[in-house]
Structures are given as structure tokens and as C-alpha cells.
Amino acid sequence: NAGVTQTPKFQVLKTGQSMTLQCAQDMNHEYMSWYRQDPGMGLRLIHYSVGAGITDQGEVPNGYNVSRSTTEDFPLRLLSAAPSQTSVYFCASKTSGVTDTQYFGPGTRLTVL
Amino acid sequence: QQQVKQSPQSLIVQKGGISIINCAYENTAFDYFPWYQQFPGKGPALLIAIRPDVSEKKEGRFTISFNKSAKQFSLHIMDSQPGDSATYFCAATGGDNAGNNRKLIWGLGTSLAVNP
């Protein structure tokens, strides 16, 4: 089991560029989510999905898009990168229902110049 | 509005000492309270969790104390070791976060440094 994988590990973008952060899990988890982590601000939920074809917004969704075409993959798209999106991004997954243990990926460190 | 308040923001402890991190919550419908541990450059990982039907849960050197009436829970790390140096997050879920929609509400984290 690879668990939750994320690519790339590091990325530098220029303002206005677009990119997709990849996330995949091999645990057959229905629930997947994206967080950003900034110093002093903890983990903030960007978007989440409770199953293939179903996505919803978290607390900081602006500037990000997601889709969920398969159970395994949950990519995060930045349409037009801004310096405020400089952060560390984590993907996480868990089984749906009362089991609440989230399994996190290793993170993507994104810098927007 | 932050529903889970965590303190302190940072903590320095000597090797062998006790590390204590506190969290307070507002929503009395929360029914699951985990602690996550994050090492530098890694994603958070579940350390220990408790449900409100017990007042304490212990796993090795790590203990959660839960006070339902005060709406507080804390993580105690006994005999703290340099390898425990990490960021610790408390979290809570339940209430309006029902069924498949159970989202974790996170504290802001505590950076723990254990000096050798």
C-alpha cells in the first residue's frame, strides 16, 4: 500500500500560471480532501469529495478547482496562481462515515513568484 | 470563527519532562477528538484519539485527558524525548458534520521542541 501520494513535491510558479497538483490513494477511501498549511494558520480545508463525481467547497476554496472522476484520484487545479497561494498543500483521505482517521500525503510545497 | 482553540503555540521541554498541550472546543455535539503529529517536511499523522464517553485514553507515553463539562481536552507526553519534537494538532468533529460529511475542525497547532 502506497497510501496517499502527491506530486510534485516542490513547485515554483509565476503569477498567472496554472498548474495541477496530483493526489492519489490506493486505500479505496471514499472521502478525499485538500488542505493548505501556512505558518500560524494551521490546516485549512480547500475542497473535499465524498465520492467519485461529488465535490464541495471547504473554508478557503477561492482560486482552486477540483474534480473527482475516480475513487483513487483527486487533483487540485490552480487556474491563475497568485502569491497568496504560496503554501504547503496536503491531500488526505479517509473512509466515509464514523471512521474519522485521515491519512495525509507528504505534501507539495508551492511558491508563487 | 475558530471552534477549536489550541494552546500554547509553542513549547520547549527538557528531555524526560512532561509536555502538555491544551485544546478547548465550543460545539457540545462534537463526538471525536483526535491529536495529529507532524514532523518537518511530512504530512500530519494520527497520534491518538478519544471519544467523549471516557475521560482519559493512554497509549504508551501519550495520554489524552478529556473534560466534557469544561469542553476541554489535552495531550500529555510523558518522559518527553527529542524524537517527539514536532508540531501537534488537536481536532474535533461531529455535530453538524454528519455522516459522510464528517470534516475535522482543527486547532492551529503547537510546535514542540524537546531539548536533549
Image (cartoon, rainbow, N blue to C red):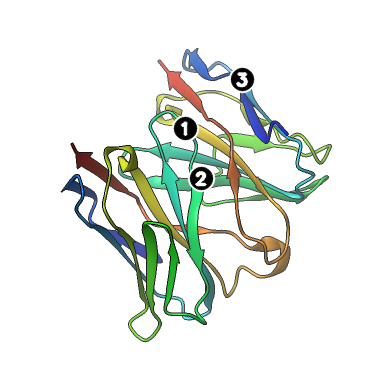
Q: Secondary structure at mark 2?
A: strand
Residue A96: x %, y % from top left: 73, 58
Per the image, the residue denoted by label 2 is B45
Residue at image point 42% right, 57% down? B60
Residue B65: x %, y % from top left: 36, 72
Q: Secondary structure at mark 1?
A: loop
The subunit carrying tag 2 is B
Residue A75: x %, y % from top left: 69, 31
The subunit carrying tag 1 is B
Instruction: Identify the disc placed on residue B42.
Output: 1
Residue at image point 83% right, 37% down? A69
Closer-to-camera residue (B36/B116)? B116
Instruction: Identify the disc placed on residue A19.
Output: 3
Neighbor class of circle 1 (other Cα within 10 Å; few <14, some 14-19, many 20+) is: some
Instruction: Identify the disc placed on residue B86.
Output: none
* Looking at the image, residue A50 lies above or below residue B75: above
